[in-house]
């Protein structure tokens, strides 16, 4: 029977592959109003026809070439364009059928939607044109203008336009702040490098970057200028008021929005810095890293080489990092609150009815009573009293809270209890207290982790696990997001939360866990004590401890009290006891656990986590005895007596394609009554041009009944 099932699953996966390829949206370009053209400050008499696809503006290649005097011939019938670029004499060849362009000896690929034959011309996105033809251009849709400026050789043949009027400093939304880790030759140069995401542009501080890389460039934010020397004695001068930069005696103009004064530095777009400085900059928002790739040796590289040579000659190791004095940071008695508030109104008119809705939300944070205070208020039109959630918390990574308890985190007020495997799912929020000495960057439990936090109105969050698109949530009435009971595998577990705000804000948070390095040291104890009273008056309490028995052996103890749920309503209380053992071997983790319930019933579990090549393998066997009441199996009719699970997750690379993530799962339930049921699942995920594609297939059999379903996420 297994072979037919496997063949069915493989066939379904093969059928899903073309669905992924066909899932691209319809990008038919739409015509825009004709744009007035300004070439190097001179307004031309003839406007240009332009089109738009998504957020890209497409310009006619032949018309732009004529304006600039370029020898480029366009053939729309064959979807080709060819010619010679001035100055360098490099050949230029564009082929729409292959979605590629050749400039000199370089062959580049592009997305088909960014260059299309429309009418008697080939329309190309502004980004591609600027890159291929060495142009500076900007589209000002509010004023229906296209501003063109030819760089390098082209600029020499055209009169220098009049300098633009100085503009005042531009304010940048602080919510778009990024804190990047700067890498050079595989070494971390800085782990707290400030940057800003402004739409599609990443703005980097010129002064701080010059200091890190030891470039002789001095920034004067009060004057809106910078000057100095680049390697090989090339003079550098920047003038924000005139939107002008001089590199090695050659002047270039740029769009004012791409460079501005922020605080005590001048922030410049990554594209401009790459053009001005002898280096390439690669920003990865997923990992919050900035990789510096020099095109020629930088002063910092030369200094590091001299230090390594001196250390080798002296027979010494490089100097260790300075031991800076520790300065504790403690919340004050009371502070000025930071308030994020919003108001929304909705009016709907029908043929026989009218409906009005309004809602006000406020999220406040401040120091209060020596703790970190937060409050969330929601007032809607249909409620006489507002919903209020208040929490006081204190975190100390050095375990200096509550004296002998040596706690790392203390929480009072509104909170949610963590889930307990096989006993209690993550609780709804209620009022209570929680104390723990577990490391702040540790998962909630051995093989499960929950991600919860605040999500203001209008925001949404997308969850990725090991570069696999996993889930999405939009803002809720309670101002929270929750991804509960996420499974952890042997090896690296990378969670990435990508937040998008209503005004284009972008924020990325990462959490990483290595299960094979999570054993507790001998004699060490990590505990969690928490109790909560829910809104319906029911009480939930959890006491758990992980005890280091030996170097590779960890014991687990736990007590849990939760209400019995009858039709979703809390009834009498249930008490549970937990006893477990974890063995951290060199290439695997073995786990065993026994849960007992007061009044009868027990649940036993055996598990194995390891790796097979580039794949993480999880095996789990669970068996129930007696009348053990369990939240986890409540969705299976008849009651589960025995469950076997297999989970295989990893990635492969096929030629030059991006990494393909495969997630295979199999589950078998043996029930108290009726036939057993089987479930097989396959999830494939891949990243194409910044877009995450995830396709899931699931096959189920219960007795003689079988079903297949799937889901595609983009």
Image: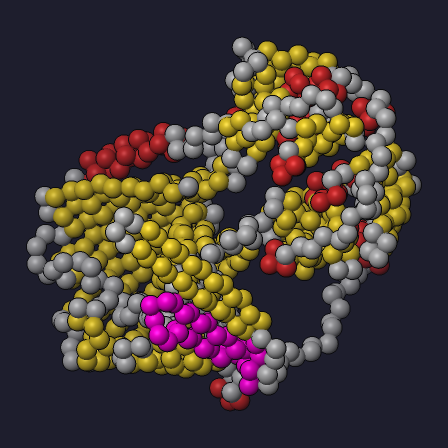
- Image coordinates of residue 560 in percent, x first then y, are 30, 78
Q: Is residue 191 left or right of residue 519?
A: right
Of 552 and 624, the residue lying toward us: 624
Identify the image quadrant of the N terminus.
top left
Q: Is residue 451 left or right of residue 129?
A: left
- Image coordinates of residue 297 in percent, x first then y, are 81, 42
* Up-down relation of residue 133 to residue 410 (above or below): above
Of 693 and 644, the residue lying toward us: 693
Q: How is the image coloured?
A: secondary structure
Quarter location, residue 189: bottom right
- The stretch in magenta equals 366-395
Identify the image quadrant of the C terminus.
top left
Residue at 36 percent of width and 81 percent of height: 531
* Up-down relation of residue 36 to residue 487 (above or below): above
Quarter location, residue 426: bottom left
Decide whether residue 371 is among the magenta residues: yes
- Image coordinates of residue 48 in percent, x first then y, are 64, 23
Residue at 76 percent of width and 30 percent of height: 149
């Amino acid at each position: 029977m297994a072979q037919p099932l496997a063949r069915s699953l493989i066939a379904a996966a093969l059928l899903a592959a073309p669905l992924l390829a066909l899932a691209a949206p319809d990008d038919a370009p739409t015509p825009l109003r004709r744009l007035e053209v300004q070439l190097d400050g001179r307004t031309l008499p003839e406007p240009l026809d332009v089109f738009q696809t998504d957020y890209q503006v497409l310009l006619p290649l032949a018309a732009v070439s004529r304006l600039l005097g370029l020898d480029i011939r366009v053939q729309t019938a064959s979807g080709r364009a060819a010619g010679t670029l001035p100055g360098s004499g490099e050949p230029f060849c564009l082929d729409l059928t292959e979605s590629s362009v050749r400039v000199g000896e370089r062959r580049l690929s592009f997305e088909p939607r960014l260059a299309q034959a429309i009418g008697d011309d080939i329309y190309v996105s502004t980004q591609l044109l600027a890159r291929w033809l060495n142009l500076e251009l900007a589209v000002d849709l509010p004023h229906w203008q296209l501003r063109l400026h030819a760089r390098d050789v082209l600029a020499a043949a055209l009169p220098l336009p009049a300098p633009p009027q100085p503009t005042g400093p531009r304010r940048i939304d602080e919510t778009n702040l990024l804190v990047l880790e700067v890498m050079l030759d595989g070494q971390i140069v800085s782990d707290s490098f400030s940057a800003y995401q402004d739409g599609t542009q990443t703005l980097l501080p010129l002064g701080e970057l010059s200091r890190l890389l030891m470039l002789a460039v001095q920034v004067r934010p009060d004057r809106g200028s910078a000057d100095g020397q680049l390697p090989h004695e090339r003079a550098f001068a920047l003038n924000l008021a005139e939107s002008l930069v001089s590199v090695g005696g050659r002047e270039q103009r740029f769009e004012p929005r791409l460079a501005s004064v922020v605080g005590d530095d001048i922030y410049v777009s990554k594209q401009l810095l790459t053009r001005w400085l002898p280096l390439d900059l690669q920003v990865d928002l997923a990992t919050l890293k900035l990789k510096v790739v020099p095109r020629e040796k930088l002063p910092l590289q030369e200094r590091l080489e001299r230090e390594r040579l001196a250390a080798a000659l002296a027979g010494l190791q490089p100097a260790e990092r300075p031991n800076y004095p520790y300065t504790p940071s403690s919340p004050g008695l009371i502070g000025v609150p930071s308030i994020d508030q919003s108001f929304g109104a909705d009016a709907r008119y029908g043929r026989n009815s009218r409906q009005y809705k309004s809602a006000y939300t406020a999220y406040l944070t401040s120091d209060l009573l020596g703790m970190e205070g937060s409050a969330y208020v929601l007032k809607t039109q249909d409620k006489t009293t507002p919903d209020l959630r208040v929490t006081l918390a204190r975190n100390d990574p050095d375990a200096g809270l509550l004296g002998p308890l040596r706690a790392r985190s203390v929480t009072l007020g509104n909170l949610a209890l963590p889930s307990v495997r096989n006993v209690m799912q993550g609780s709804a929020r209620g009022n209570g207290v929680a104390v723990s000495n577990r490391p702040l960057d540790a998962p909630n439990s051995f093989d499960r982790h929950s991600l919860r936090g605040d999500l203001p109105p209008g925001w949404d969050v997308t969850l990725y696990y090991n570069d696999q698109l996993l889930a999405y949530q939009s803002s809720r009435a309670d101002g929270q997001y929750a991804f509960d009971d996420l499974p952890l595998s042997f090896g690296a577990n990378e969670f990435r939360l990508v937040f998008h705000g209503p005004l284009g804000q972008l924020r990325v948070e990462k959490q990483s866990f290595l299960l094979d390095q999570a054993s507790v040291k001998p004699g060490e104890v990590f505990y969690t004590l928490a109790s909560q009273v829910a809104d319906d008056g029911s009480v939930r309490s959890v006491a758990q401890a992980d005890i280091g028995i030996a170097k590779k052996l960890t014991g687990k103890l736990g007590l849990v009290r939760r209400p019995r749920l009858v039709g979703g309503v809390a009834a009498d209380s249930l008490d549970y006891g937990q006893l477990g053992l974890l063995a951290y071997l060199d290439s695997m983790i073995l786990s065993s656990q026994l849960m007992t319930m007061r009044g009868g019933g027990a649940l036993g579990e055996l598990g194995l986590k390891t790796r097979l090549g580039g794949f993480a393998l999880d095996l789990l066997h669970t068996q129930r005895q007696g009348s053990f009441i369990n939240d986890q199996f409540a969705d299976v009719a008849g009651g589960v007596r025995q469950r076997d699970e297999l989970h295989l997750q990893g990635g492969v690379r096929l030629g030059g394609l991006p990494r393909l993530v495969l997630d295979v799962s199999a589950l078998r339930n043996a029930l108290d009554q009726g036939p057993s049921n089987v479930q097989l699942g396959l999830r494939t995920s891949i990243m194409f041009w910044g877009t995450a594609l995830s396709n899931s297939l699931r096959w189920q059999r219960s007795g003689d009944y079988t079903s297949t379903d799937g889901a595609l996420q983009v």
